[in-house]
Amino acid sequence: MYGKRLGVNVDHVATIRQSRDTLYPDPVFAAMLAERAGAHQITIHLREDRRHIQDRDLDILRDTVQTALNLEMAASPEMVEIAVQVRPDRVTLVPEKREERTTEGGLDVARERKRLKEVVAELRKAGIAVSMFIEPDPLQLEASKAVGADAVELHTGRYCEATTREEAERHLESIRRAAAHGVELGLEVAAGHGLDFTNVEPIAAIEEISELNIGHSIIARAILRGMEESVQEMLDLVY
């Protein structure tokens, strides 16, 4: 047993709802089922274009989530204002491009250090813990610490997308080194993006990673197997 916390991202439940502009399926209900199955956190991404999660979802989830609510968002004035008003337990700052299907890589904290330091300060003043979604790169880890982040979430997409065992191991080793360096810096280390039922165990085995945020693969399996069973299956692999 690895003992990792599992954050379940329910964005794609909202994606199905928004594809037909209906009231269902409701990501709020999905979050409740995920928690009932043992999830330690609910993660949602409120995007500028509101392509899936809506403001209504965030408001209700803030009132109903019993574990912890992790809000992924761009470091924009609009989103900072919303976060300060709603006060999720954690904000994870992510890069965001309107044309992307999903988040394509880590935030360049080193390049945007001055602006992000101000954003982090404003969020922490409101009592919100802040995490940076970054590549497993020492420069980005050190910049995250410098701007005042409490935690980082390491982007695992390149590991998940590897087409050979050698390539996967190379990216896995980068994640291992980054996780160890993050802990040395005093950061809490999470990981996520692209993790599924076939590739999660090597990431879960990294001692320094305390949390995994997983969405698409759980929601995809839940369509066929049910939400609670799917969350429990993932917990069996990571916890």
Image (cartoon, helix red, strand yellow):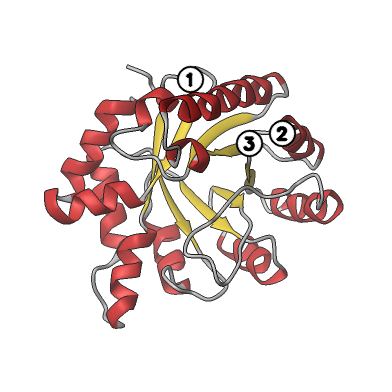
Q: Residue furthest right?
A: 114
Q: Nearer the viewer, residue 141 or 175?
A: 175
Inspect the image, locate mark 2, and give the three-letter code of the amino acid beneath it. Leu
Q: Residue furthest bottom?
A: 21
Above or below residue 46? Residue 212 is: above
Residue 172, given in percent of the width and then of the height, sits at 51, 26
Label 3 secondary element: strand
Q: Residues within 10 Å of mark 2 (few under 14, many from 20)?
A: many
Label 2 to label 3: alpha-carbon separation: 9 Å
Inspect the image, locate mark 1, and give the three-letter code of the amino acid beneath it. Ile
Label 2 secondary element: helix
Residue 151 marker: 3
Which residue was labeled with disc 2?
141
Q: Are marks 1 and 2 in contact (CB under 8 Å)?
A: no
Residue 206 marker: 1
The residue depicted at 34 percent of the width and 61 percent of the height is 12
Q: Residue 44 vs residue 148: left or right?
A: left
Q: Nearer the viewer, residue 126 or 233?
A: 233
Q: Which quadrant holds residue 15?
A: bottom left
Residue 163, given in percent of the width and then of the height, sits at 42, 37
Q: Residues within 10 Å of mark 3 (few under 14, many from 20)?
A: many
Q: Total number of numbered labels?
A: 3
Residue 121, given in percent of the width and then of the height, sits at 78, 50
